[in-house]
Amino acid sequence: MANEPQQGKKHDPDKVRRDALRDLDRVNDTSEVFGTSAFARAANKAKNHLNASDKDTNDQIEVWGTRIARILAVGFVIYLIYTLVNMTR
């Protein structure tokens, strides 16, 4: 039957615990937090991205290089949008 344990496999409580914690972390990352708006979450995500929060804080050159590159990229996208809007006039 489908619900019967397979022969030869032992129940590993550590693996079950690791899998459960991994699943809980995934649900926590993908679930919507009650009481916060989508705009506030998006703004916090953008702020963290531009501040290079995902980079190693011990390597200041990497952090500042990432910040500068990301800010320049945002400026370039704004310039492209401005140019596109003015071309259609």
Image: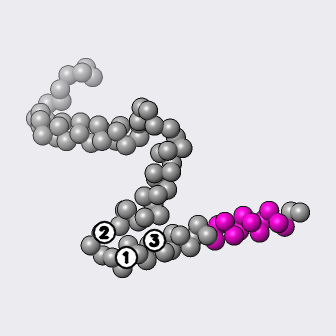
Determine if the magenta segment contains residue 80: yes
Residue 74 location, quadrant? bottom right
Q: Give the mark nearer the N terminus: 3 vs 2.
A: 2
Q: Nearer the viewer, mark 3 or mark 2?
A: 3
Residue 64 picture location, percent across and down? 41, 75
Instruction: Kindly identify which residue carries mark 2.
Output: 56
From mark 1 to mark 3, how far is it between C-alphas? 9 Å
Amino acid type indicated by mark 2: Asp
From mark 1 to mark 2, how far is it between C-alphas? 8 Å
Mark 3 crowdedness (10 Å alpha carbons): few <14, some 14-19, many ≥20: some
| Res. 8 in view | no
| Residue numbers of the magenta segment | 76-87
| Relative to 86, 35 lies left or right | left
Amino acid type indicated by mark 3: Arg
Residue 76 to residue 33: above or below: below
Residue nearest the observer in this picture, 20 or 89: 89
Mark number for residue 62? 1
Local secondary structure at mark 1: helix
Residue nearest the observer in this picture, 26 or 72: 72
Residue 51 picture location, percent across and down? 43, 64
Instruction: Kindly identify which residue carries mark 3.
Output: 67
